Every structure is written in C-alpha cells, then in structure tokens.
Image (cartoon, rainbow, N blue to C red):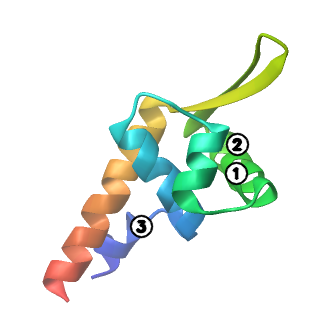
Amino acid sequence: MKSIIQNINKAFDHRIRLGIMSILMVNESADFTTLKELLGVTDGNLASHSKALEAEKYILIEKQFIGKKPNTSYKATKEGKEAFQNHIEALEKLITKG
C-alpha cells in the first residue's frame, strides 16, 4: 500500500489545484475568468493556487493585454500533465485496492 500513496502528489491535495489541473488537462488553455467561474472561487484563491502550481512548473501563466484589458491565461506543462496523470492513477489504484 505504501507504494501506491507515494505517487499521490501533495501539489494536488487542495480541491482548487485539483480543479485547475482537471480543467487544463481537457482544454489547451483557460483564462482567469473561465477558471474562476468554473471553480467558483475568489480572485485571491485562484491566484494563490495557480502560483503554487506554477512554482512546481505544472502550469504556465501568461499575462498579456487584449486591447487595453489585461488577460491571464493558464496552460498545463508537459511535466504537469505527467504528474497529474500519475496522481490520478495512484488515486484509482488506491480506490480499487481499498
């Protein structure tokens, strides 16, 4: 059982981080407003959790202006996708063996 839980990634322990990665796994990218609305979180919560994932190099955050309006977009990195897939597989193994 220990080997199964070793693959559970602490970076995805929080529901907001889990949600961010879930959305980015099935979409090439998502903007700040989309993530905020889909997850039902505050600006601050989304910003802090996305920064935590960025620090792990699991997502890329790109800031730009569209016209005069700022736009922040998020994209899962290759490392992030692999880490998240390993995390999900570990959870599935834990559930089926439990």
Neighbour class for label 2 at 10 Å: few (<14), some, many (≥20)?
few
Residue located at (42% from left, 30% from top): 78
Q: Nearer the viewer, residue 75 or 94?
A: 75
Q: Quadrant of the N terminus?
A: bottom left
Residue located at (48% from left, 62% from top): 9
- Mark 3 and mark 1 in contact? Answer it, CB < 8 Å: no
Q: Which residue is mark 2?
A: 55
- The amino acid marked with disc number 2 is Ala
Q: Secondary structure at mark 3?
A: loop
Q: Position of residue 47 (x, y in %)?
A: 76, 49
Q: Position of residue 75 (x, y in %)?
A: 53, 31
Is residue 10 at least partly visible in the picture?
no
Q: Position of residue 94 (x, y in %)?
A: 25, 78
Work out whether 13 lies above or below 63: below
Neighbour class for label 3 at 10 Å: few (<14), some, many (≥20)?
some
Q: Which residue is mark 3?
A: 8
Q: CA distance from mark 3 to mark 1?
A: 17 Å
Work out whether 30 lies above or below 52: above
Q: Which residue is mark 1?
A: 52
Q: CA distance from mark 2 to mark 1?
A: 5 Å
Image-based side of 60 in relation to 24, left or right: right
Q: Position of residue 29 (x, y in %)?
A: 49, 30
Residue located at (20% from left, 89% from top): 98
- The amino acid marked with disc number 3 is Ile
- Mark 2 and mark 1 in contact? Answer it, CB < 8 Å: yes
Is residue 36 at least partly visible in the picture?
yes
Image-based side of 94 in relation to 38, left or right: left
Neighbour class for label 1 at 10 Å: few (<14), some, many (≥20)?
some
Work out whether 81 lies above or below 10: above
Q: Secondary structure at mark 2?
A: helix
